[in-house]
Image: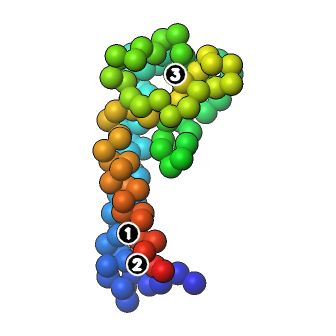
Amino acid sequence: GKLSSTTFPSLGRLRSKVRTLKRDILSTVDSILSLSSTKERLAVESGGALTMEINGRLVIPISQDKYSQNSMMGIVHDASRSGKTAYVEPTEIVGPTNELRQAEGELRAEEA
């Protein structure tokens, strides 16, 4: 079973931190996706999802022809087989995602 956050307050704090970080990251991505500069770069012609997770990182599909290496848009984590789509982790969430991954690791260690 799951250890009680009440009995183990440190677990409660870590679980709360993980929830808050996830919510904040999703909120930031939603804001990024609502920008017209992002919308015009999205690779969604296939009707795919606007976000996906690659190796624990939230990425958005960007048309390769509309992504430039110097755009500071984010980190490319993968590309489609056709090479038409780059899966980019927005720069704005790199730090918070690193913090989330660290908090998730601490939580796993505490729960072990």
Amino acid identity at mark 1: Glu
Which of the two labelled residues, at mark 3 and mark 1, occupies the earlier sequence position?
3
Amino acid identity at mark 3: Ile
Amino acid identity at mark 2: Glu
Q: Is residue 21 in view from this perspective?
A: no
- Taking the image as shown, residue 30 lies to the left or right of residue 83, namely left
Label 1 belongs to which residue?
106
- Report the disc number at residue 110: 2
The single residue placed furthest to the bottom in the displayed view is: 7
Q: Position of residue 87 (x, y in %)?
A: 53, 29
Q: How far apart are the alpha carbons under marks 1 and 2?
A: 6 Å
Q: Quadrant of residue 107?
A: bottom left
Q: Nearer the viewer, residue 21 or 79?
A: 79
Is label 1 in contact with label 2 (beta carbons under 8 Å)? yes
Question: Which one is closest to the eye, mark 3 or mark 1?
Answer: 1
Residue at 54 percent across and 24 percent down: it is 86
Q: Position of residue 29 (x, y in %)?
A: 41, 36
- In terms of secondary structure, where does tag 2 sit? helix
Label 3 belongs to which residue?
62
